[in-house]
């Protein structure tokens, strides 16, 4: 399986490490044999070699801050979009930095690859939240797989859980804690920190970005519930169709009052069937301490899935992290290997 | 897909209802078209008809307490073992009453079907806990599928989660609340009931049997961790190889003391890698209130899966129930339909 990495930051490097560490076992147990023909990264440089790039060496160069261009044997000078359009590849691994509101540049990369029948595995939320139907139809038309387990809960399986192990159950509602940064901030506020101090702590730990809007205003969680609405519920929703409120208005006094009532604030993303319609929303909610979601603290994510046949099933797990998101991409690669065997 | 039901009690009837209610959608979305050629039940009678039994009528007869023999067109007089040996069938659905310590009569049924290349879907723990390796080898040798999602957490997916969506992660440890009856009793004892009163309540609700030993002495949980040890960890363990303690020695005073310390008793089944060995155990453990397993109350089950690549993923869901266990069998049928497409 010839792989092209678009984006070679934490997630791409996390996947590269898993691929190298598991090389023998992936081939033996899962029939996945791989070679990397291209890597494109705006900061780390671009390399293309249809005969196969030494991935360990690429990790070394990236780790030292040296350009990947040293590994180029193609001489085409392709950037990410060039690779998506022209590289010899079976699977495009799309994990570039992407604006959650425009879905670019990832959407253009994904479109170019699917349009020529190259499978796509991505962790970029934008293309899914904004263009799922178009991209899924494009994949179908060209016989390509289009997988994106890492977009909703990073390595914690939720899309595959619903699609493969809950196949046959009617899904009525999904709601959960889909953003680890805001959950971390709320957890620290319960420990007595102010919102500003908790945010500063999250930034110091690398959980929150310098401009934290995508997390604290709820956009990240909104993108995720929109993906669930499209993929699991078959709805045609865009992020702007649903109400979205973040955690910026919650005060230390609100948190203390909730605590006194045996409750706890959580930023809850929710998608559900309402008669014939599918609706979605993101808002801070008071959760009773006995409920499964109340016990989910820190940067952990969780989603409760309400079904007709089975009642409620809840999955709890890490919602971010280098190895975790890389693992989600690996799980998708294994799905492709299994389906194409 | 020609189906034979062995056992037509709650679980078998629960599956029959799901098959009938979902008939069109199962065919359209999952490529599963089915006909029932045989039903055998020690209490409700036996029926065999290679041209197809009217399943709605069978549910009616069973509901009224009338014998299924009225639907027989075979005239062979086969009981469950006869059907397993001779019925025209693609899949044997094994859900008879079975002794958890001997694994019979289900083991003989499963062995007979797999030995002639008939796929088996079962919810019987005994054959798995005692004879997994032998039966898996038999299935392999005869090109048959052997699936048993319902044995560990009923309809809540745990085996499929590990096998399909966590494929690629190294599983280091699984521990959880695998018996709903004892969890219900412990929950009621926290509300102030004595052990005897809580057990009586569980019996009145149908959670516990008149002779409750398999639940309260931990045997049921022990069978489940032994299945996990064999299937997920590849170990060669029998139930009698592992220490097992139930909840019968826990007093109201123990519960009150734990509560005062911010802890809670749970009956925990655990399987883990210990150097080169795989070990398993069942015992009541004090769990801190902040941990995911502490929040699992009543008849709900949960398992926390510790992995190398991904950290810890926890699944929480119903651990028993007519529709739920029937759903687990349906999920296995869909897996067979998918693999055999």
Image (tube, coloured by chain):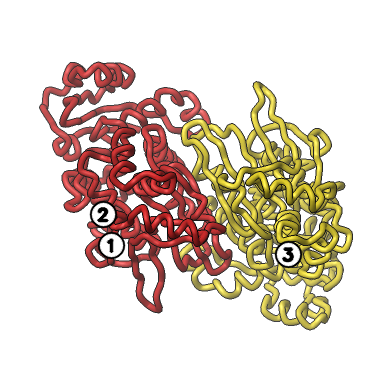
Chain colours: A yellow, B red
Residue A280 at x, y = what percent? 72, 35
Residue at 45 percent across and 66 percent down: it is B173
Marks 1 and 2, how far apart at CA? 8 Å
Q: Which residue is mark 2?
A: B217
Residue A171 at x, y = what percent? 57, 34
Label 3 element class: strand
Residue at 66 percent across and 61 percent down: it is A325
Q: Are marks 1 and 2 in contact (CB under 8 Å)?
A: yes
Residue B319 horizontal side relative to residue B137, left or right? right
Q: Earlier in the sequence, mark 1 or mark 2?
A: 2
Label 1 element class: loop
Residue at 71 percent across and 55 percent down: it is A183
Quarter of the image where the N terminus of chain A is located? bottom right
In which image quadrant can residue A283 be found?
Answer: top right
Depth order, front residue of B296/A224: B296
Whether residue A90 is visible to the viewer of this picture, yes or no, is no
Q: Which residue is mark 1?
A: B244
- Residue A5 bears which disc, if any? 3
Residue A313 horizontal side relative to residue A8, left or right? left
**Residue neighbourhood size for the residue with mark 2, other residues' Cα within 10 Å, grouped as few (<14), some (14–19), many (≥20):** some
In which image quadrant can residue A38 be found?
Answer: bottom right
Q: Quick one: which residue is furthest to the right in this view?
A: A211
Say above or below: B258 vs B59: below
Marks 2 and 3, how far apart at CA? 54 Å
């Amino acid at each position: 399986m010839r792989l092209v990495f678009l984006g070679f930051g934490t997630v791409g490097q996390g996947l590269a490490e898993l691929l190298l560490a598991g090389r023998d076992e992936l081939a033996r147990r899962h029939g996945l044999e791989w070679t990397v023909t291209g890597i494109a990264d705006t900061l780390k440089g671009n390399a293309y070699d249809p005969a196969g790039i030494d991935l360990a060496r690429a990790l070394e160069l990236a780790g030292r801050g040296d350009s990947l261009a040293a590994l180029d044997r193609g001489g085409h000078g392709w950037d990410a979009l060039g690779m998506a359009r022209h590289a010899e590849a079976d699977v495009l691994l799309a994990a570039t930095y992407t604006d959650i509101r425009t879905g670019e540049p990832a959407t253009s990369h994904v479109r170019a690859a699917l349009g020529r029948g190259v499978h796509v595995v991505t962790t970029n939320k934008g293309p899914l939240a904004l263009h799922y139907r178009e991209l899924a139809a494009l994949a179908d038309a060209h016989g390509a797989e289009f997988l994106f387990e890492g977009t909703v809960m990073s390595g914690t399986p939720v899309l595959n859980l619903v699609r493969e192990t809950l196949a046959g159950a009617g899904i009525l509602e999904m709601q959960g804690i889909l953003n680890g940064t805001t959950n971390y901030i709320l957890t620290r506020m319960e420990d007595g920190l102010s919102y500003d101090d908790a945010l500063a702590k999250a930034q110091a730990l690398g959980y929150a970005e310098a401009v934290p809007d995508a997390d604290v205003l709820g956009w990240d969680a909104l993108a995720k519930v929109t993906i669930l609405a499209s993929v699991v519920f078959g709805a045609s929703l865009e992020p702007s169709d649903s109400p979205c409120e973040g955690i910026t208005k919650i005060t230390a006094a609100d948190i203390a009052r909730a605590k006194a009532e045996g409750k706890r604030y959580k930023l809850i993303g929710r998608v559900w069937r309402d008669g014939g319609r599918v609706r979605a929303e993101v808002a801070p909610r008071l959760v009773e301490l006995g409920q499964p979601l109340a016990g989910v603290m820190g940067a952990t994510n969780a989603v409760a899935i309400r079904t007709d046949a089975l009642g409620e099933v809840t999955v709890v797990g890490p919602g971010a992290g280098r190895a975790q998101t890389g693992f989600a991409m690996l799980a998708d690669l294994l799905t492709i290997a299994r389906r194409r065997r």
